[in-house]
Amino acid sequence: MQNFLTAADHNRDVSGMQYIYPVVSRRAGGVSIGINLNINNACNWRCVYCQVPNLTRGTPPPIALEVLARELRSFLSDALHGDFMQRYVAEGNQQLKDIAFSGNGEPTCAKEFPEVLRLVGKVLREFNLIGENQPKPIKVRLITNGSQMDKPAILNSMRHLAQCNGEVWFKLDAGTQAGIARINDVYLKPQSHLQRLQHCAELCPTFIQTCMFAMDGVPPAEADIAAYLALISQVKSVVQGVHLYGLARPSYQLEAPRLSRLSAEWLEVVAERMRQLGFTVHVSD
């Protein structure tokens, strides 16, 4: 039996590498090469739906840039010119879709993040995956909680990301301070976070990414949905759209037994309300 990667299994160890790992991404629609800078499972947020085991509060350790570069070149060679796709990916998904900064914590908390981004751009140009001579350049995606988007160095990196055919998926799960605290376990003002989102979107194409789920069998309340819609409506002119998704894999947080999936129909109703506000919405249940 073939041991194919699936959208339900984002095992970071399948490649045997320190920073680079492949996944089949339901939202990207094929193979995504993940870059995990948070190899210590540390993040400055603690989302209740997070699938990272042994998650701790903190920041990434120093990044070994030469190791990351070597691993990325090696994996791209195997994915593009070797038999990786045939060995690990089902036939319908055997297409390299993107490079994604994601992993086991917030990637922009790594102090070397600007250097890592420049390095990734250099390697992708070596493989002719981005650049002026590539008619269909690969996407470089940053999946982020947006918490560092008020830092000049990170905002400057967003300009560079845009030059690498990049885009940002910016986490915004709730429209109230209480909702953000309940879902992301951080205390911040929604308007402040929205300002970070706006700064980011002005520099690089940016999608809002939102996870919705039932807690104790109860879906998000109408008041919470209305507050969320009112908040995101303020930035509809600068963002590319919304990625609305449900729970695909089990949480490893204490709240896991309390969480459950919402139906595709329920998510679609909320998505339609976003579309009526003028958003492009992609739904993954």
Image: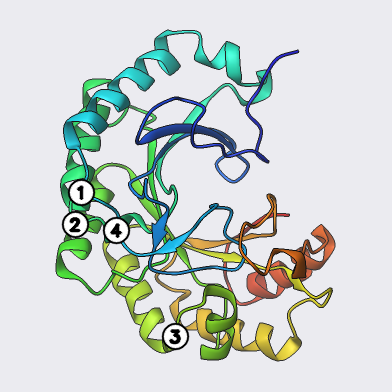
Q: Which residue is mark 4?
A: 108
Q: Can residue 160 be seen in the rendering of this structure?
A: yes
Mark 3 vs mark 4: which is more N-terminal? 4
Q: Which residue is mark 1?
A: 62
Q: Which residue is mark 3?
A: 187
Please, what is the three-letter code of the amino acid marked with disc 2?
A: Lys
- What is the distance, in whole Å, between disc 3 and disc 2 at their CAs? 23 Å
Q: Is residue 3 left or right of residue 15?
A: right
x, y (%) of residue 231? 52, 85
> The C terminus appears in which quarter of the rendering?
bottom right
Residue at 81% of width from left, 67% of height from top? 266
- What is the distance, in whole Å, between disc 1 and disc 2 at their CAs? 8 Å
Q: Is residue 265 above or below residue 38?
A: below
Q: Can residue 131 be seen in the rendering of this structure?
A: no
Which mark is in front, 4 or 1? 1
- What is the distance, in whole Å, between disc 4 and disc 2 at their CAs? 7 Å
Q: Which residue is mark 2?
A: 111
Which mark is in front, 1 or 2? 1
- What element does badge 1 sit on? loop
Please, what is the three-letter code of the amino acid marked with disc 3?
A: Tyr
- What is the distance, in whole Å, between disc 4 and disc 1 at their CAs? 13 Å
Q: Closest to the observer: 185 or 101? A: 185
Q: Which mark is residue 224?
A: none
Mark 4 vs mark 1: which is more N-terminal? 1
